[in-house]
Amino acid sequence: MALVKRTRPVPVMNVTPLVDVVLVLLIIFMVVIPMMETSPHVMLPDIFNPDKEAKGKTDPFTLSVTAEGAMFFEKEELKAEGLEARLREANEREPARRLVLRADRGTKYRAVRDLLKVTQTVGFPGLSVRVNALDASNR
């Protein structure tokens, strides 16, 4: 009788299901993350040599203006008639909070100037204009 040598099966790891799961997660994150930002789309003007990041105890309020002229206080859309009343109410509720103005680069200067005048009459402790910072090498 001849001896038959039996070989044990060699385990092989199948990575196909792992790759499938990772690709599905990647696609989900690529689609979901951009949708999480719910603020209005505003193309900010660019500057060179920005100031250092301010370290405050409270985050400032955000006032955004789109290129079409729509105004948003935080994420709440405002009409021009109710802007001053809403800003005054927010300033009285939290007088130490500053205001950051985000205006689209296509916004007319007159509209931004009028907003600055309204915020000045309301009496915020500080007003900043948010812009995009560019490297000097990008000129």
Image (spheres, rainbow, N blue to C red):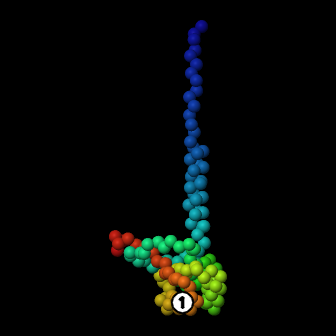
- Amino acid identity at mark 1: Gln
Q: Is residue 82 left or right of residue 19?
A: right
Q: Tell me where residue 4 appears, x and y as whole percent.
A: 58, 14
Residue shown at the point (60%, 72%) measured from the top left: 38
Q: Which residue is disc 1 drawn over?
A: 120
The residue that appears at 51% across and 83% down in the rendered structure is 127
Q: Position of residue 36 (x, y in %)?
A: 60, 67
* Camera-side residue of 60 and 33: 60
* In this view, 12 is above or below 17: above
- Give whichever of 56, 49 is nearer the camera: 56
Asked whether the viewer can see residue 55, the reply is yes
Q: Residue furthest top?
A: 1
SS state under label 1: helix
Residue 89: image quadrant is bottom right
Residue 23 vs residue 1, the one in the foreground: 23
Count of numbered labels shown in the rendering: 1
Work out which quarter of the rendered image holds the N terminus and state it.
top right
- Which residue shows up at 56% across the image and 66% down it? 34
Residue 102, compared with residue 108, is above or below; it is above
Q: Could you say which is closer to the camera, residue 93 or residue 19?
A: 93
* Res 64 visible: no
| Residue 128 spot, x, y in % from top left | 50, 81
Q: Judge whether 31 appears above or below 86 on screen.
A: above
- Around disc 1, counting alpha carbons within 10 Å, would you say few (fewer than 14), some (14 to 19), or many (20 or more)? few
Residue 9: % across, % down: 58, 26
Q: Is residue 87 left or right of residue 50?
A: right
The structure residue drawn at horizontal position 60% and vertical position 49%, both measured from the top left corner, is 21
Against 61, residue 82 (above or below) is below
Quarter holding the C terminus is bottom left
